[in-house]
Amino acid sequence: MPAWLLSFNADDWTAFFTALGFFVVLIGTIIALRNLAIIRRTHELQAFESFIDELQSCAEDRKFLFQYSFPPNLAAIPPSDIQRLENVVNFLNRIGLLLENHILPPRFVFGMTHTVIIRCCYKLSDFLKYQETRIGGRYGRRLLQLAARAKRYHDTRAVHRKTKIGIFEGSRGSTVIYETVTKKGWRRLLQQAGWYIKEALNIF
C-alpha cells in the first residue's frame, strides 16, 4: 500500500470515499442523461417517420377534399364521400394531438403543412358543423384550434406573411382563403414585435 494512503486518518478516508461516491454518481448521471437523450431522439424520429407516412397516406383524400363540391344539403353526401372526408378530419385531429402533447415540434409540423391545414379546414368548415349537429359532441373543434395556430405561424414567419393562401375550386377558379393583415402606424410596430417574439419562442 502506498505510504500516502497509510497517512490517512478516519476523516481523510471519509472525505475520500465521499468524493469517490460523488464521482461515481456524477458519471452515472451523465450516462443516464445521455441514454435518455438517445431514447428521446429515437421517439422523435419514430414520430417524424409516422407523421411523414400519415401525411403521404392521406394525400389522395386531401386531393379529393380540395376538388369536392359539397351539395347544398349536406345530408345528401354519400356515405363513401363522408368516409373520405372523415379520413382528412382524423388526419388533422392526429396532427393536433401530436402538437398538444409536444411529441412533434410546431415549427417542423407547420413548416411542412400549415397551408395544407388552412386549406383543409376552410373546405371542411361547414362539414364540421354538420357532423357536430348530426352525431353530437365537439366534433372537429381541435381542427379549428389547429387552423388558428397554422394562421399564426403564417403571420409570424416573414417569409410566409407576404404571400396569400388560395385554393382552386374548379370552375370558380382560385379563391384566396387567407392572407396576413398588417396593421398601420404604431400598431404595426407592436404587431411586428409580437411576431418576432412568437417566432423566437416558437409560439405558434
Image (cartoon, rainbow, N blue to C red):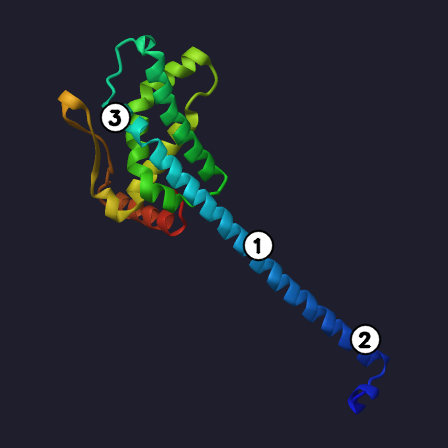
Mark nearer the viewer, 1 or 2: 1
Q: Residue furthest bottom?
A: 3
Q: Quickly name the residue at label 2.
A: 14
> Which residue is pictured at 26% across the width and 48% down the height?
158
Q: Secondary structure at mark 3?
A: helix
> Which residue is pictured at 29% across the width and 41% down the height?
154
> Which residue is pictured at 42% across the width and 44% down the height?
48
Q: Quickly name the residue at label 1.
A: 36
Q: Position of residue 84 (x, y in %)?
A: 35, 21
Q: Position of residue 152 (x, y in %)?
A: 33, 39
> Which residue is pictured at 80% across the width and 80% down the height?
12
Q: Which mark is residue 110?
A: none
Q: Which quadrant holds the C terminus?
A: top left
Q: Quickly name the residue at label 3.
A: 66
Q: Is residue 106 above or below residue 136?
A: below
Residue 119 seen from this side: yes
